[in-house]
Image: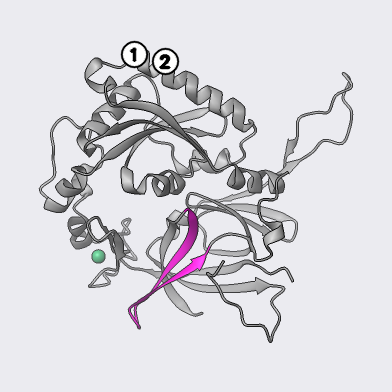
Amino acid sequence: MGIKQFLGIKWMDEKPKILLYDNVTHSMQYEDCERNYRSEKDNGKTL
Amino acid sequence: MKIANGIIEVKKTMEKHCKGYYDLIKKEIVPCQSFTNLTDSGYSQCKECQEKSGFDLCLGCNGSTCQTNSGKARDFCHEGHHVYLAYFANDKLKVGTAASYRRYERILEQGALYSIFLAQTPNGRMARQIESQISKLGIASRVNSSYKMNNFIIDREQEEIDRMLMQKYESILRSIDERCKKYFIKPEYNNFTNISNKVRQNLLEESRQLNLFGGMDAPVHKEYERISKPEYISGEIQATVGSLILLKSGVRYSVVNMKSLEGWLVDFKKREIGEKDNEVFDKGER
Ligand SMILES: [Zn+2]
């Protein structure tokens, strides 16, 4: 993904995102910052 | 098929630039227009962005005299606010304020997994006055990141924390003056037990031996490395609490303070686990 500026971890709609800024294309990029299973069955797993 | 995402690799470079500012009116992050180089500075925001945010003079405000000269900050302050009481691991309580429209994000960015909103005010100034009164009762208004890193695991159960917050709410209500009291609300309780559980699933080890009294010992905390100034990190993200991430690499855990990377240029890589080569991976749609 290359060199980007790290702007921080932002919480959006109660989900953490890694916010990166590309000064060449002047664009923002949001990356999920959590372990996400796409399988619905795994959601809401508790101890 | 199960697909988890979250293996990241972040390598800090030798360059830091201004991180821009949060536009209180547009409600979005604006990158720094001049991309000011701040590599040799202790700051992560340039003067221009600090002024543009309009918020710099509001830090430490106790609601007595307004210090700001920014119209934006004043407009923001005229929005409805909430005052919260948050619980941190090892029974540390913190009082704070949040603009009502982003109050859940506010407590999440603080890493407050259990909290109550105890007052609702028509503006930020009143909220700050209530906060200041509550902090005079001996409740912290700041919890620093080293406390949060050292106290990363919440041992108490949700019900206990709930009870503790409610008791504190009642004692605050008894001590606070009438002028503030009228803004108090029936406490709105928030828990992010799902996040706390992710931490516990990784960092608690259930005792498997019976103790002398025939019961089980309390779960043991696993060791984790504390990385307050990351240079290079890699691993699978297990949980995010505020700006701290819990990474797992092999059998080793680390808690990383991502806040200290703000503004730095980084080499960022992310890998999906179990991703099939020919499968289209649509992020963000769930
Ligand atoms: Zn700037």
Quadrant housing residue A34: bottom right
Q: Mark 1: few, some, or many residues within 10 Å (few <14, many ≥20)?
A: few
Q: Amino acid at mark 2?
A: Ser
Output the chain of dot 2: B
* Three-letter code for the amino acid on which mark 1 is drawn: Ser
Vertical comparison of A2 with B31: above or below: below
The residue positioned 63% from the left and 50% from the top of the image is B225
Asked if B111 appears above or below B248 in the picture, the reply is above
Local SS, label 2: helix
**Contact, CB < 8 Å: mark 2 with mark 1?**
yes
The quadrant where residue B285 appears: bottom right
- Name the quarter where the N terminus of chain B is drawn: bottom right
Q: Does the magenta portion include A25?
A: yes
Q: Determine whether the beta carbon of the residue marked 2 sits less than 8 angstroms from the nearest atom of ligand 1.
A: no
The residue at 42%/46% (across/down) is B104
User: What residue range appears in magenta?
Assistant: A14-32
Mark identifier at residue B175: 1
Answer with the quadrant where ligand 1 appears in the image.
Answer: bottom left
Q: In the rendered image of this protein, does residue B245 appear above or below residue B197? A: below
Which residue corresponds to mark 2? Answer: B171
The label shown at residue B76 is none
Q: In the picture provided, is A21 more to the left or to the right than B155?
A: left
